[in-house]
Amino acid sequence: MTPLQERMFALRDKEYAEFQSKLTPGVPTENFIGVRVPILRQFAKEFAKEAEVNAFLRHLPHKYYDENMLHGLLISQIKDYEECIRLTDRFLPYLDNWAVCDIMSPKVFAKHKEALIEKVKTWSSSQHTFTCRFGIETLMSHYLDKDFKSEYLRIPASAISGEYYVKMMVAWFFATALAKQWDATIPYIENKKLAPWTHNKTIQKAIESYRITPEQKAYLRSLKIK
């Protein structure tokens, strides 16, 4: 066991490890240490200042789920855009679950929207499930407000995948887009541009949103594919 792993095991919560393993299918139960996310976030802030952090970020793959979560949190803190992209590209192929994918949210991305959109297009077209999911999630996080362009909706609409975690991300994206950019997004539902499962899941998630008006919800219900 490495010194870092020993430190993480000192923070473990066995019940949380069991709980998290049930939420993360495909990852063996023995790969969970059980460090709760708020504690791991604080640990990441402190570990980022230590000399060992660079060696840890170079060392892939990791043994434990919690190490991958730590890796994602550390990448999210990096302030140099090019370095952040380099480390993200290196890490993405090793992602094997939704939780590590979704915890990655580099703050530096917000300052480099023009360059980032090209990376988003590349990630979103990947055949690797969680690289694709990360690309679409990044698009959702950064391009549905003041940087929105209707052409960006074609990126998730073009993500052809039978993988559950990609289909769910596309539905989540379009449900959020309906809430934030209704006029540009509703034609994708009206014209059935999405696969039937994703189409109906988008409607379901949009109807659950408090940001969608009652009138919009009623209209969306009429557009379900039966």
Image: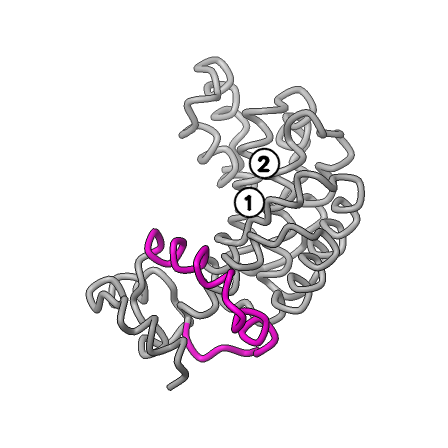
Question: To which quarter of the image does residue 190 belong?
Answer: top right
Query: Compared with residue 93, is residue 197 higher up or lower down, i.e. above or below?
Result: above
What is the x, y in percent for residue 11? Answer: 27, 66
Magenta stretch? 37-64
Give the SS element for disc 1. Answer: helix
Residue visible at 50% across and 57% down in the picture: 73
Residue at the disc numbered 2: 174
- Amino acid type shown at disc 1: Thr
What is the x, y in percent for residue 40? Answer: 37, 58
Q: CA distance from mark 1 to mark 2?
A: 9 Å
Residue at the disc numbered 1: 198
Mark 1 burial class by Cα count in 10 Å: few <14, some 14-19, many 20+: many
User: For residue 4: magenta?
Assistant: no
Question: To which quarter of the image does residue 26 belong?
Answer: bottom left
Give the SS element for disc 2. Answer: helix
CB of mark 1 within 8 Å of CB of mark 2? yes
Say whether residue 124 is left or right of residue 2. right
